[in-house]
Structures are given as C-alpha cells and as structure tokens.
Image (cartoon, grey):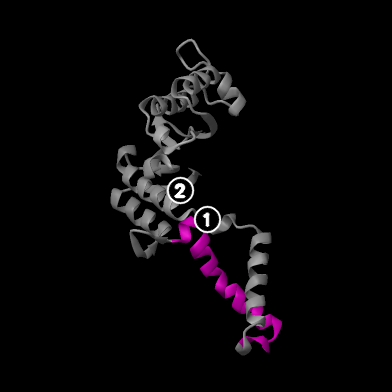
C-alpha cells in the first residue's frame, strides 16, 4: 500500500506482489508510485478505468503491469485505489507498505503545511487501531441495537445482575455504549500519543494552537 499527494490530490493505492522481497524492489516501488500518479492525474471511476489509462510511456497501466510481471517474474496486481480531491489530504505509509492510510481534513485559517503533523498523528492512529467507524454519529441503529443486546445478555449471565428488570439492564447497557464508542470510533478513541485526551480533543486543541480549525472529513486505510 502506498499513499501520496500529487498536485493537491490525495491518493492511496494497493498493489499486490507475491513476496516481501519484491515489495522492496526498486522497479516495483516505481510502478506503484507511477500508478498513484496516474490516479491523481485522471481520477478514474473504477479499477477497469484505471487499467485502461495511459501509464505515460506508450503503454496502458494494464500493459505496464504485464511488463512488470515479465521483468520481475512474479504475479503483480493493482488491487484497489482511492483519492480525495477536496480539502487537505495527509498520507501515511506504515511498516514498509503493509498499511497505507490517507486522511482527509477540512482546514480553516491554517496553512496546509502546518496541519501535516496533526494529520499524520491521526493517520498513525488509524494504521495502529483500525477503527470500525470514524465518529459515533456513523454507528447505525442496527449496530447499536446488536451491541445493547450483547450487553444485556452478559448481564443475564451475571449472578448479581440477572434478577434486575429488563428496563434497568437496558439503561445500564445504554450507559456502557460510551465504552463501545471509545473502542470502535476514531474520534472518540483515546489518542495513542496521549491517552488523557480523545483524538477529537487532540485535533481541536492542536488546531486552536495553530490559530484555526481542523475537521476530520474522511480517511481510507488499505492493509
């Protein structure tokens, strides 16, 4: 996985090879970067559209991929990609390309260059903890109901709690949902570099210190 920003377009791509050894091969790395540049320049709608685009050397991306297979002698495949055209994107590549993260921010009153470190911190959090949701507002009613059901079932199996009325159990379960948000939602998670604040609190205070505002818009994590 590789993430980058080209002419203001944030791009993350995943290209698969068969061995770690090839993953470090200079020709392979150049191909991955080349694919990212094609995505940034053309903003293709899907993988088929990307593969049909010109790689920039007289070959299509598909043909260049086939050329790489011949040159390197391993199966190589462009698997997926994503990009952001608005706001400020911050790329982060973890563990030599095992994980690629692209964070997209809406920034007001701060120079783009000054929010890169903040964006990278958020990207590192996403790389390390792989949250299911970005914010608790994204958690659907179905997921909430399922979680509450699990919590009530746990109380049913607990000697001290089992005899309590269902309404009481549901109330306790609702109270415990904050813990679910803290574990599963990026902005409500404890910030890995400073567990005394959430990611959202860290972002707000960092933005304030820079004299503006930074809002988390979206992110993509490829592993």
- Label 2 vs 1, first from the N-terminus: 1
Q: Secondary structure at mark 2?
A: strand
Residue at the extreme right of the image, as rendered: 166
Other-residue count near label 2 (Cα within 10 Å), few / some / many at <14 / 14–19 / ≥20: some
Do the numbered discs 2 and 1 sit on residues whose CB atoms are within 8 Å? yes
x, y percent for residue 209:
29, 52
Number of dots carrying numbers = 2
Which SS type dominates the magenta stretch? Answer: helix
Q: Is residue 223 magenta?
A: no
Q: 170 or 214, which is in the foreground?
A: 170
Residue 27 placement: quadrant: top left
The relative height of residue 178 versus residue 214 in the rendered view (above or below) is: below
- Give the number of the disc on residue 135: 1
Q: Residues within 10 Å of mark 1 (few under 14, many from 20)?
A: some
| Residue at the disc numbered 2 | 216
Quarter of the picture containing the N terminus is top left
Q: Residue at x 60, y 23 (%)?
A: 49
Looking at the rendered structure, which numbered label has been put on residue 70? none
In the image, residue 177 lies in the stretch drawn in magenta? yes
- Callout 1 secondary element: loop
Horizontal side of 89 relative to 115 (left or right) equals right
Q: Position of residue 81 (x, y in %)?
A: 52, 34
Residue at 52%, 55% in the rendered image: 135
- Image check: 42 left or right of 117? right
Marks 2 and 1, how far apart at CA: 9 Å
Magenta segment boundaries in residue numbering: 161-189
User: Residue placed farthest to the front in the image?
Assistant: 73
Q: Which residue appears at 50% of the width and 13% of the height? A: 59
């Amino acid at each position: 996985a590789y993430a980058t920003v080209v002419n203001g377009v944030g791009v993350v791509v995943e290209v698969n090879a068969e061995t770690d050894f090839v993953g470090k091969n200079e020709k392979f790395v150049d191909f991955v970067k080349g694919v990212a540049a094609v995505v940034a320049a053309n903003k293709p709608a899907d993988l088929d559209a990307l593969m049909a685009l010109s790689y920039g050397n007289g070959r299509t991306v598909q043909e260049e991929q086939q050329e790489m297979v011949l040159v390197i002698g391993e199966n190589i495949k462009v698997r997926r990609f994503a990009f952001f055209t608005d706001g400020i994107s911050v790329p982060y590549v973890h563990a030599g390309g095992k994980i690629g993260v692209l964070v997209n921010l809406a920034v007001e009153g701060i120079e783009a260059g000054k929010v890169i470190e903040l964006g990278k911190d958020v990207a590192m959090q996403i790389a390390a903890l792989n949250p299911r949701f970005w914010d608790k507002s994204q958690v659907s009613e179905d997921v909430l109901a399922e979680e509450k059901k699990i919590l009530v079932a746990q109380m049913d199996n607990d000697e001290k709690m089992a005899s309590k009325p269902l309404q009481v159990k549901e109330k306790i379960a609702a109270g415990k949902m904050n813990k679910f948000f803290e574990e599963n939602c990026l902005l409500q998670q404890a910030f890995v570099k400073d567990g005394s604040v959430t990611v959202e609190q860290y972002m707000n205070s960092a933005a304030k210190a820079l004299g503006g505002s930074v809002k988390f818009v979206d992110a993509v994590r490829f592993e």
